Structure formats: structure tokens, C-alpha cells
Amino acid sequence: MKVAVISDVHGNRHAFEAVLEEVAASEADELWCLGDLVGYGAEPDRCVELARDHVAVCLAGNHDLAVTGEIPLEEFSRGAQLAARWTQEVLADDNRAFLLGLRPEAAEDDIGLYHASPRDPIWEYVLSALLAELCMSTQNHRVCLIGHSHVALSFTREPGKVATGESRRHGSELDISGDEWLLNPGSVGQPRDGDPRAAWLMLDLDELTASYHRTEYDIAGAAAAIRAAGLPDSLAERLEYGQ
């Protein structure tokens, strides 16, 4: 089975629809989402609706949990707080109910799924080999998928060695049939690795391979929607730069 893996959509309908189109044209049998359907972006309802229609497995991210009131807004930056409060005001009841039913971790086909990390599924940013090492020493699955950092990357640990990692660009392919792995597909709706294109991962559960993908989308349209909603202009500006 082949699975397309996404994370951190963040209310960016333009990016989500572009990725869904590419996934539909691929050989993917299922779509998994590692959380944060909402937050930052201007079209949370549409993004939740698309997830409800197309995603087989969906986690809750920290922004999802903030919008549903399960974690306090005070733990977020000012821009994130403003976006979360606005999302709380506009989100439809049925979409709020969907988010309330999600959790930040799961396991599918012997793969661990976490919004942030195996050690802290909600908050930990795994951006260094040291943190990956700590996660691998606690995770219950040989291969785990993580999101949250908005950076497409991978970490691996061979038996008897320390973890190593690197960022991943479009076209990167990995053999994950051996060793331990932490794989981050990057962000659909707000990449922060210098590549503004929407990021996603294709996971082949039979051949045990992973390939990284980037998808062009209407960045100007997504930015215009953020400004039209009266959200902080910085949330629109950063889309162009992938930061």
C-alpha cells in the first residue's frame, strides 16, 4: 500500500487543494494527515471539510487543539493567538466537532504517527539529531512520522550508532527497510524550509521507501485571503518565502 502523508495545512485552502490534486493523480491508496488543519490561514472550514472528505487518518495538531479550547491560547505567539481566536469565531460547528474527535498521536500499519514527536506529541520541535536520538530511544515503532516543525526532513539511527539527519528536497528518495527513522513531510500550508511550495511525502509500506514531493500552488491567492480576513499581514508575507 502507498500512503501520501501531509502535515500542517494551516487553513491554506489553495495549497491543500493543489496537493490533493497531485495525490489523486499519484498511486497513493490513502492520505494521512499529521495535524494542524487550522491556524494561521484564512479558510479553516474548507480545509477541515477537505480533510473530512479525503483523509483516512488525521491527527490533532497544537493549533487544532487551541481552536477547540483544549490547550490555552496563551502558549502561542501573538500572531498565532490572533489567528486561533479568529478561527474559533468563524469555524462551523460540525468542523469544530471533527477537530474535537482528533488526537495528536496514532499508529497505522506498524508506523507511529505524531503531530510533534514521540516524546511530546503536541509541542516538541524535532530539528536536531540530538532530539531525534532522544525520540528514537523512547518511540515504540521503528518508523515514525512527525510534523509540527514545517520542515521536510529525515532522521535515522543505525544499530549501535547515534542518530543523524538532514533536510529533504523535492525528489529525495529513501530506503527505510532497515534502521530507525523519523520522517517529517514538511508543511502543506506554511513551509519554513525556504521552499514556498506545498510539501508532502509518499510512503510505500510494501517496498518500505519514502519520497519527498513539493507542489506549486497559488501563493498570491492564499496571501490575499489572509489579508481579506483581517489576519496579521506577516502570515501572508511569509508564504512567498517559505519561512
Image (cartoon, rainbow, N blue to C red):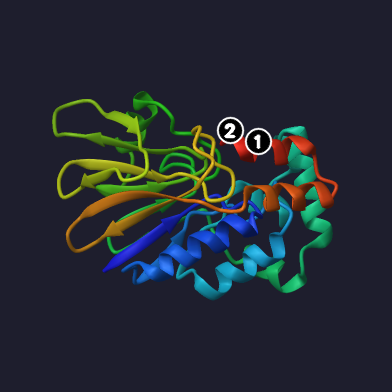
Give the labeled residue for mark 1: 238
x and y, in percent, of residue 157 in the image: 22, 34
Q: Residue at x 51, y 40 (%)?
A: 150
- How many marks the image carries: the answer is 2
Whether residue 56 is visible here, answered yes or no, is yes
Secondary structure beneath dot 2 equals loop
Tell whether 106 sits left or right of 69.
Answer: left
Q: Residue at x 25, y 36 (%)?
A: 156
The three-letter code of the residue at mark 1 reads Arg
Q: Quadrant of residue 196?
A: top right
Mark 1 nearby-residue class (10 Å; few <14, some 14–19, many ≥20): some
Between 119 and 87, the one nearer to me in the picture: 87
x and y, in percent, of residue 163 in the image: 26, 29
Q: Earlier in the sequence, mark 1 or mark 2?
A: 1
In the rendered image, the vertical position of residue 15 relative to residue 239, given as above or below: below
Give the labeled residue for mark 2: 243
Q: CA distance from mark 1 to mark 2?
A: 5 Å
In the rendered image, the vertical position of residue 80 relative to residue 100, given as above or below: above
Q: Residue at x 58, y 49 (%)?
A: 189
Q: Which numbered tag is attached to residue 99?
A: none
Label 1 with label 2: CB-CB less than 8 Å: yes
